[in-house]
Amino acid sequence: MDGEDSRGGDTAAVSPHVRQAIVAAVPSADDLPDGLVVADAQARIVIFNRTATRLTGIPAEAALGRDFRDVLPLHDGEGRDWWKCVDPYGGLLTRTRHPERSLFLPGGAETLVTAAYSRDAEGRVERFTVCLRDAAQRIRQERDRADLVSTVAHELRSPLTSVKGFTATLLAKWHRFNDDQKRVMLETVNADADRVTRLITELLDVSRIEAGRLEMRRQVVDLAQEVRKVIAGRVAAGDAEDRFRLDVRGALPEMWMDPDKVDQILGNLVENAVRHGAGTVTIVVEPDVHREGAAVSVRDEGEGIPPEAAQRVFRQFWRGSSNRRGGTGLGLYIVKGLVEAHSGVITVQRAPGGGAEFRFTVPAGAPDYA
């Protein structure tokens, strides 16, 4: 059967040295996020990774050694057998790959498929590689991107309209306004410009978190002092001083963290408590004995977060029912990304006195860990 198509029923096991050679070229196939199927020169499957099993429901042991066209009978949207259309082993000798397209498994599940060829000097297929991706996940990602564009457009329209309106008015009728009126309009323009800047900063943070490109500049951080700085900023901005309470419980280990990102985490959590909660906002800073680090809890006295919503609060665009003042719905998503960038964990639960409690724990890093 050597050199022949094995679809006629030859399901002999792939020779160990062939499989070993291909596995050596892809040493971590089971760690890949995409499904990977590799067939040899006789179209027999030599690699079928974990993700391929998850996407297709076919165990690897049931796929290895069989013709890949029998294991993966993919069809296009019109029901045509994709393998007959492309004829991988009998088609053009110059073909090197197939671009991604949406295909369907026998049960109707949609999957995104790409394929690539490895050929010998005469153009014959030595190895055929198929990559499978979850179409549902891609659809969710595209929907999230569309939501992001819609949110950005909505959030930018209001401040930019205000900036344009006030600046046009001042330019056209400067001498008709007294100094107090000019100051009010310029302060409004300044506030709206700050709002646009915050939105752009949030979008950049989301982009860096999703791409795994957050830059960490660690140094020794006094968490209690960082909380005091955040509270002082809220008070300077007009919040009542007695609205906040800091509770420091015990000495912390030396914490190596990015101070700018710590300020961002604490600032977002405190703002969330002020905006969506009620009563006193309590920030508890204490050692985390389980992880040999620190734990910070931000509690309010509002209605709290329903248990069924607890798993959704850290998603993009999540907004609670008490969101009276708007917002992009990106703040808690960014907080989670920043905490995890410090190898930390963040959770939400009901506070001891009611309301919501956001608690994050981070390990005590070291200079060489930074």
Image (cartoon, rainbow, N blue to C red):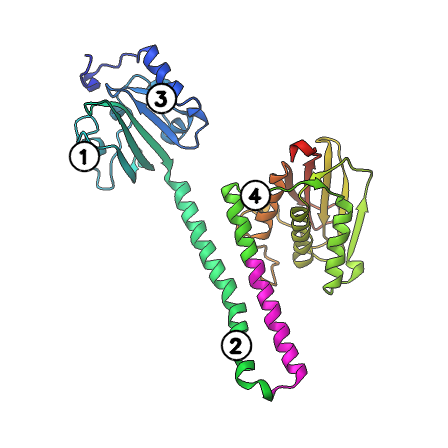
Q: Main secondary structure of the magenta part?
A: helix
The answer to whether marks 3 and 2 mark residues whose Cβ atoms lie closer than 8 Å is no
Q: Is residue 367 above or below residue 313?
A: above
Report the side of 342 relative to 14 (left or right). right
Q: Where does the image place residue 132, in percent across and percent down from the top left?
A: 35, 33
Report the side of 220 relative to 95 (left or right). right
Q: Name the residue under label 4.
A: 214
Q: Name the residue under label 1.
A: 85
Kindly state the secondary structure of the residue where label 4 is placed: loop
Q: Name the residue under label 3.
A: 47
Q: Where does the image place residue 287, in percent across and percent down from the top left?
A: 77, 36
Q: Can residue 239 be seen in this view?
A: no
Q: Name the residue under label 2.
A: 165
Single out the residue that lies furthest toward the bottom: 176
Q: Tell me, yes or no, whether the highlighted magenta stretch contains residue 356.
A: no
Q: Which residues are the magenta region?
A: 177-199
Kindly state the secondary structure of the residue where label 1 is placed: helix
Report the side of 12 relative to 256 (left or right). left
Question: Disc 4 or 3, which lies upstream in sequence?
Answer: 3
Specify the label residue 220 is tagged with: none
Looking at this view, is 360 or 163 the one in front? 163
Q: Tell me, yes or no, whether the highlighted magenta stretch contains residue 197.
A: yes
Instruction: State which quarter of the image contains the C terminus.
Output: top right
Q: Is residue 120 visible?
A: yes
**Gap in angstroms between the C-alphas marked 4 and 3:** 34 Å
Residue drawn at point x = 72 percent, y = 34 percent: 293
Question: Disc 3 or 2, which lies upstream in sequence?
Answer: 3
Name the amino acid, label 3: Ile
Decide: few, some or many residues near mark 2? Use Cα within 10 Å; few <14, some 14-19, many ≥20. few
Decide: few, some or many residues near mark 1? Use Cα within 10 Å; few <14, some 14-19, many ≥20. few
Question: Disc 2 or 4, which lies upstream in sequence?
Answer: 2
Decide: few, some or many residues near mark 3? Use Cα within 10 Å; few <14, some 14-19, many ≥20. many
